[in-house]
Structure formats: structure tokens, C-alpha cells
Image (cartoon, coloured by chain):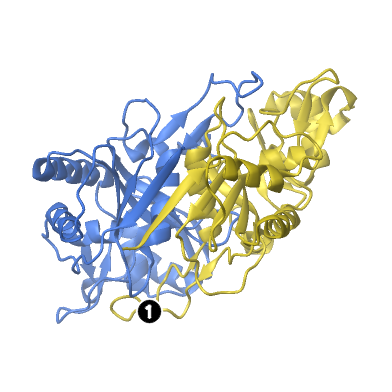
Chain colours: A blue, B yellow
């Protein structure tokens, strides 16, 4: 029977800059009587990677530019937050009341460049914002190597974030970093049950895995930022970074 | 431990117009020594619902209009296929080489109005295209009621389809019909670990469930069009149709 299982790694502490996330995951798995199995896929919430990597900006240190002040009036958000978004963006795509969609520096089209203040601890140094990892594919690679070194098992790793979409209400878990997995299953040339060449021939399995894991993560008090997916057999294709999912702007009809 | 399981229902026959899909699913579950459990979520590929409901158009019967011929030259597709897409659409959003994005009659923004010839049997009557169900929410409701009548267990039902997205390469499983489940988890007002009100406050769990199931479905010879999701606990919100996921055009910055 074709099947798969997902479980959240329970009891991770609040992540701080410099933390060895791989070690913490391995320790929590062991505490639950679990361990990584060959073929496991680890999905990790962007937020804890960003915090571990110190991708934090202290809001009090931000000086908004004239552009940030102008956008702030339209969007209805703190101009300092807008400045942080602009600093981590290549291009602004849409500005509306309550909406600022950009191409983030790594190439992801998303609201607010993925900048978020939820789940980032306010300490004596004042309120902080978390940016996306500088290179989430590299983060996934590093985490994968560290998990392999610690356990002898080399899982695939996906870093996910909750992204809004065109046309549809609500966010879905989406892959922004990927290691050890082909993010896209290119089925061009495959034929369906009756021999027709498949029309929808590219399936983004990394995004589907990211979405599946997101169901167990929660976004509130009970946040569970690490999920293990077991039993899913990826197609036999070479691994690639999540960056391969980005549609070039020149090919995108909805920029 | 927070966890969930997914398994595909094996051995379903090729679906024909008029088939009782619920009965076939129940029979195949029984043959595998399985049964529906309370809380199960059944995800069913749109294609078999469309076939069971006879949402088929014989290509040879289609007379393309002047508009279909004109679009055909741009898109590079059979003008009769374009005509079938237009007949099931409210509005054409984008026309490019290889791309025709519309608002389908039920309100879904998608390529080719979800019209597809893959996995639809070519018989003596000639090649057919499958349209989306006329009302996939109603289809999900009916299937749910029929499953309840047959088994005494009332699962949630999602009808999914593979949709392309703006900005990202590859399709992902997406909900177009929903019964017995809140498709959107509105978390507005909830607070995160440190008391901030959550920014990304609406999560489309129906789409995440649809994507998760899609991983087991495959798109080729081994198609597995029915997947059971077990162990996922939806938020305590009133059920709603998948139509609730549609962002009104007036609120959409990417039309």
C-alpha cells in the first residue's frame, strides 16, 4: 500500500542565534525514542533557521527612507518594517492597503519579503524582525550535512515558509530551501493510463511536502517547527535547490 | 506525538460515467482490510469525479468559434480544445504561447479551465476531454453523504486538482471541492509564542491537505486517485465549501 507518515518533533526549545539546530533536533528525536531513518525528509520552519542564523533586525535601529515612508502610507504598516522589507528585496511588485508583495533578495515572490515579527523574542534589546535566511538552499545543505555527521543518516531537508498566493485566500507551506531532493518532478514525456502525453507535466513535490508538513506545524502557541516525513519515495531525479522552483520573471505572466 | 498518516486506496477500476465512486472506494478499502475511521479525510482526484459525472466532451463534436481560432494561433493548441475551455470559463485572464489562464465557471483561476485529456479513455466514440465538475463542492457533499450511508462513518471530503501557480514552476495539488471541513484556518486574533498578533493569519488547510494527498496520487500509469488522510485534527471552525478559498477579483492584485 502506498503510504506515508508525518510526525512533529516535540519539545524543541526556543531557538537562539548561534544554536546548533541539527543537534537540538537529534536530541529531541532521541528523547521521543525516535531516530532518523534512511529516506526521511525533514521539513523545518524558516523562522527557526533565521533565528539560529541571526537574521534579525532590531526595529529601533531602522531609519525609514522617503520611499519607505511613502509606501507606509499606502500599505498602512510601520515605515521601519517597510524599510526592512525593501532592504531585503530586489523589486516591489504590488503595493495595496495591507499588501506589499516583492521579489525577495533570494528570488522568492512573497508578501513583505517573508519578514515577520511573530515568534521572534522581544528582549531587553527591543523588538526584532526576522528576515528569510540569506540563502535557504545553503542552510538546508548545511543542516543536512550536520545531521549526517551526527547520526550517520542523511535525510533530505526542506525549509518551508507560509506564503500567500494569487487568486486564493490563505497561506500554504511553501519550500524556500531544499537539499537532497528533486524539488520538481518533471514528467514531460511520461504517458497517462491511455497513452496521452501528460499536459500538467511538472509537479512541485517540494512545495507539496512543505504544505503537508505545515499542517502539523501550527502557527501559534503550540508551534512545532520540525516535521519528519517518512515513507514518501521521491522520483529518481538528481537533487536540486529550491531556487529551481523560481519561474524566471521573463516567463511569468503574473508579475 | 502530533502525527498523521496518508495512504492511497489501491486497485480502483477505471471510472466510467455513472459509476458509484463511493461504493467503489468502500469496496477497495475492504479488499485491503481497511475501513474509514471517524476523523478521516478522503482526498479524491477531480478527474475521476468528472468522469463519474459524465463531464466529458467529444472533441469531434466541437465547432471552434472565431475567438477560439484566434486564441489557438497564440496559444498553439487545438482550437477545439480552446473552445471547450472558453465554454467552461467566465473570463480569460492571460493568453501566451503554451498558456491560457482563465477563471473557470466555478470561479477557479487556472490553466485551461482544468480541461484535460489525460486519463480520459479514448473509445470508439472518439477522443474526449474532461471538464471540472459542474459544482465540485456539491460533488464532495454528495460523496460524503453516500460514504456515510454506506459505512456509518462520515469522513471529510476534498476534491483536488493539479494547478499551476504564479511565480513558481510546477503544479501542486489544490482543493476545488470540500465537505465537512473548514478549508481556511482563520487565526486572526491568535497570538504567537511571544504574544504578537500573527501576521499570516489565514492558513488554507484544504489546499495543504490536497497537496499532501497529491504526493501519493502520481499522475501516470500508476495513478492512485483516492487518498485517505488519518490523524490530522482540523481546527474547530464551521465547515465551508472550497469556494470560500476563492479571492474575489476585486481584492486580487494579480488578475
Can the viewer see residue B112?
Answer: yes
Tell me the residue at 40%/44% (across/down): A4
Tell me the residue at 62%/46% (across/down): B44
Subunit that carries the residue with mark 1: B
Q: Position of residue A194 (x, y in %)?
A: 66, 21
Can the viewer see residue A131?
Answer: no
Q: In the rendered image, which residue does mark 1 sit on?
A: B191
Image position of A175 with respect to A77: above or below: above
Q: Please tell me how many numbered marks the rendered image carries.
A: 1
Is B162 positioned to the left or the right of B131 in the image? left
Tell me the residue at 34%/79% (across/down): B196
Q: Secondary structure at mark 1?
A: loop
Q: Position of residue A66 (x, y in %)?
A: 37, 68
Q: Nearer the viewer, residue B109 or B123?
A: B123
Image position of B211 with respect to B77: above or below: below
Tell me the residue at 38%/75% (across/down): A78
Is A71 positioned to the left or the right of B92 in the image? left
Q: Nearer the viewer, residue A249 or A153?
A: A153
Amino acid at each position: 500500500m502506498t503510504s506515508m507518515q508525518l510526525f512533529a518533533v516535540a519539545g524543541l526549545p526556543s531557538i537562539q542565534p548561534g544554536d546548533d539546530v541539527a543537534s537540538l533536533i537529534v536530541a529531541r528525536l532521541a528523547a521521543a525514542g525516535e531516530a532518523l531513518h534512511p529516506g526521511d525528509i525533514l521539513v523545518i520552519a524558516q523562522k527557526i533557521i533565521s533565528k539560529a542564523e541571526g537574521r534579525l533586525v532590531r526595529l529601533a535601529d531602522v531609519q525609514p527612507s522617503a520611499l519607505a515612508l511613502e509606501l507606509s502610507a499606502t500599505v498602512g504598516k510601520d515605515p521601519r518594517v517597510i524599510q526592512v522589507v525593501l532592504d531585503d528585496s530586489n523589486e516591489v511588485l504590488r503595493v495595496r492597503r495591507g499588501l506589499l508583495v516583492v521579489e525577495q533578495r533570494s528570488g522568492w515572490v512573497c508578501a513583505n519579503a517573508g519578514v515577520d515579527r511573530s515568534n521572534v523574542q522581544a528582549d531587553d534589546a527591543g523588538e526584532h524582525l526576522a528576515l528569510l535566511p540569506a540563502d535557504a538552499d545553503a542552510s538546508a545543505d548545511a543542516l543536512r550535512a550536520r545531521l549526517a555527521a551526527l547520526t550517520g543518516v542523511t535525510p533530505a531537508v526542506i525549509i518551508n515558509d507560509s506564503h500567500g498566493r494569487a487568486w486564493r485566500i490563505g497561506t500554504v507551506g511553501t519550500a524556500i530551501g531544499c537539499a537532497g531532493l528533486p524539488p520538481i518532478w518533471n514528467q514531460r514525456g511520461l504517458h497517462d493510463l491511455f497513452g496521452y502525453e501528460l499536459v500538467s507535466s511538472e509537479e512541485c513535490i517540494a512545495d507539496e511536502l512543505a504544505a503537508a508538513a505545515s499542517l502539523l506545524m501550527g502557527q501559534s502557541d503550540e508551534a512545532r517547527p520540525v516535521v519528519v516525513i517518512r515513507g514518501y519515495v521521491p522520483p529518481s531525479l538528481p537533487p536540486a535547490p529550491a531556487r529551481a522552483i523560481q519561474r524566471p520573471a521573463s516567463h511569468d505572466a503574473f508579475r
